[in-house]
Image: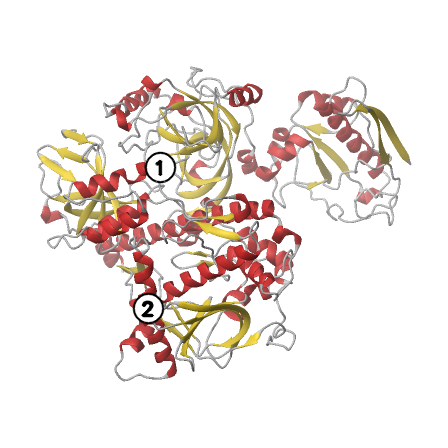
Amino acid sequence: MLKSKTFLKKTRAGGVMKIVREHYLRDDIGCGAPGCVACGDAHEGPVLEPQPLDPASSLCPQPHYLLPDTNVLLHQIVSVWRPGTWASVAFSLRPPGSLETYVEQEQGENANDRNDRAIRVAAKWYNEHLKKMSAENQLQVVFITNDRRNKEKAIEEGIPAFTCEEYVKSLTANPELIDRLACLSEEGSEIESGKVIFSEHLPLSKLQQGIKSGTYLQGTFRASRENYLEATVWVHGDTEENKEIILQGLKNLNRAIHEDIVAVELLPKNQWVAPSSVVLHDEGQNEDDVEKEEERERILKTAVNEKMLKPTGRVVGIIKRNWRPYCGMLSKSDIKESRRHLFTPADKRIPRIRIETRQASTLEGRRIIVAVDGWPRNSRYPNGHFVKNLGEVGDKETETEVLLLEHDVPHQPFSQAVLSFLPKMPWSITEKDMKNREDLRHLCVCSVDPPGCTDIDDALHCRELENGNLEVGVHIADVSHFIRPGNALDQESARRGTTVYLCEKRIDMVPELLSSNLCSLRCNVDRLAFSCIWEMNHNAEILKTRFTKSAINSKASLTYAEAQMRIDSATMNDDITTSLRGLNKLAKILKKRRIEKGALTLSSPEVRFHMDSETHDPIDLQTKELRETNSMVEEFMLLANISVAKKIHEEFSEHALLRKHPAPPPSNYEILVKAAKSKNLEIKTDTAKSLADSLDRADSPSFPYLNTLLRILATRCMMQAVYFCSGMDNDFHHYGLASPIYTHFTSPIRRYADIIVHRLLAVAIGADCTYPELTDKHKLADLCKNLNFRHKMAQYAQRASVAFHTQLFFKSKGIVSEEAYILFVRKNAIVVLIPKYGLEGTVFFEEKDKPKPRLIYDDEIPSLKIEDTVFHIFDKVKVKIVLDSSNLQHQKIRMSLVEPQIPGISIPMDTSNMDINEPERKKKKLEK
């Protein structure tokens, strides 16, 4: 049956256009209930569950389907629906094209009311229709809505209808489900006195007008990890003026949560503030103690140099909430039998969340997930509800799950749809595979990687040519041969974006069959590769460059140490060793040339854990040793990436996927320049070359570690390198590498960006064909956005994994004292680096329930005077290190000052090496 609606529309040119909208209504669509005699064979596609569950509902004792309205589906279904607890949900709702349930909008009826009526019509139709089933198969459809009028109308029309809360409370076998109901009322369920704390958020229409007129600025809200009363807003748009706005104080933060898109109003210049140097964490349990917050806010406002003041503002409204489920722990209320508790998120940038639960005793000491529902004006904290129990705090599996969830790392097993696109085993190179591919299996190729590496992306070779020049090849796993554009495997790889390396676990971007087998360039097996081959003279000058798809057979899979041993050996002169020596010689020349052009040599302490073979707990912690061979591999990977970047940009000027590293703004270097000045050294930052040269000159014979500290600090001043599409940007420069163009080509097993670059290069040399998305710069720009996000989250997850394993190490170690160097001074603390462990931590000088010492902070030098002792950046100190488990939610490495000795501040030397775990060990010994 055809229904049509005709209306007239005026065009821009002033003409009139006739518009006809047609609805084709069908009478052959099945109800979706298996065993329905009336529908017979009319079922198409997915059907309802074959056996509707009887969830022991006291309201609906007979088997039934649930029909939720739109709002319940949006807000409640994820929280409370679990297989085996709810009845089957009637998701195969009668479609709009069904003759029996088609509903037209009536005159004067708004779209929302029409939708509500359509769902009621479908519910009524279902109940009438299902009566035709046999007595033993009798079913009912129950309508779930939180809309009071909608529910009343449904009952009037003879439809069984309940609110979500009523229905969930009726599930007597699952009382815990009530905790999972979202609390949607912003103003209706406050437990505070009713005192208004925050100003009202402006409606979206006013915000948009204000942004358009320039009254307000739109940006992303970034909460501080170090100070819960401070945040910044990164303003969207091209303007450099007021790019970053500081917010200080609860009322100015105005209920924004990290990553929300907000509208801010700039405060008058006489109210601008400087970024705070105070470390403040929200540790209060009393929700009503707003006066205490105001007292803490006053600490932030101290006299500062006018040059330090930054544009300052306040949040006037929320444009888009970017809430997600948060992992953390329940802070159980001190009030006995209370159902209202505070949840403390693992991420310190997220405020505490108030939830109601009847399971507080069960959930105490567990990692749980909580979702935010809203944040009323008169509530110190947002409201939320319990979602999931992850496991016990401190358990390695639980903590790994938490850090993966918190950093949004996709880590579910690969689906069957994805795995179906893997090659069938056993696999070997076929004649078809060799089309448009060179056979380089005769070359003496080898790989050099960290110990235990199974996903070997790259291999190298170097040989002398008959003309006396050298041929150097970088051979990269040809992952794009196995992952074809657009299929499920490709889509999942693009979504994951990168492999994530944790201390004891690797979350692969591609299935293991590819990452550790077919794409891994292991020795003595034939593998497909994409090769970048140069002809060079002995001065490492490139004479010719060519790219080819290839087949290789690596002659050795070496570690950095093994390769170094071959290079240094006086007795080894085989082909592999000769190749490595040639590569190492050329790499030194390439590196020297790069540094002369202004490439930066920065530093970042990296650590390696040695694990117990049985418990898998860390038993030793060392900073990673870097050898010449690390630098050798790095140089040729950089050279290959630059060569490929030039090639793909020549061929695809508008849609090459490149990587750039923006130059930091001068303000980023302030701390580095001041720190160097405090040691009578000058650091110039006007260009990368001048920075590199001044870092090379910054040496102190009496303080050999100073140069490393300066390079560590310089690393902190840098901007994040990002992927971008060449057609959407003008600035291609890579600041850190001093290269005018750069991309990623050398790690396609673990980076999706490299797969796209491989595809572009393959099209450029005629080895593969293109496809529409590859030459769509807008789609490439969107892809780059996801890749940048995934790359950043992977880095954070890796750091969190190192932090957790460091805690495990010091848990077994007890209390130790070590030499450390000051990296930063704050108003009430110093941040130190312990070279032995590559560990960074904060030494606080103000503690609860202890007399406050006399602190004088000078931001210009910068320095911190405690009583009569002055601390500067890079000063050497001795600290006590211990794992503080007093707060299970945020177990942390606690550092206290041992030297220099300051009465009332420093820990006495004789207790600094005491083992706090010794009493526990003795107790366990006695028990045995």
- Residue 795 position, x and y percent, is 41, 50
Residue 776 can be seen in this image: yes
Frontmost residue, 458 versus 188: 458
Pointer 1 with pointer 2, Cβ within 8 A: no
Residue under circle 1?
225
The image quadrant that residue 505 belongs to is bottom left
Left or right: residue 692 compared with residue 155: left
Three-letter residue code for mark 2: Thr
Crowd rating for badge 1 (residues with CA inside 10 Å; few <14, some 14–19, many 20+): some
The local crowd at label 2, few if under 14, some if 14 to 19, many if 20 or more residues have their Cα within 10 Å, is many
| Element carrying mark 2 | helix
User: How is colour applied across the structure in the image?
Assistant: secondary structure
409 vs 383: above or below: below
Location of residue 861 (image quadrant): top left
Estimate the x, y position of residue 868 in percent, counting from the top left.
8, 33
Q: Which residue is mark 2?
A: 629
Give the camera-side residue of 572 and 161. Answer: 572
Looking at the picture, tell me which residue is in the foreground, 790 or 9: 9
Q: Position of residue 705 (x, y in %)?
A: 18, 54
Disc number for residue 255: none
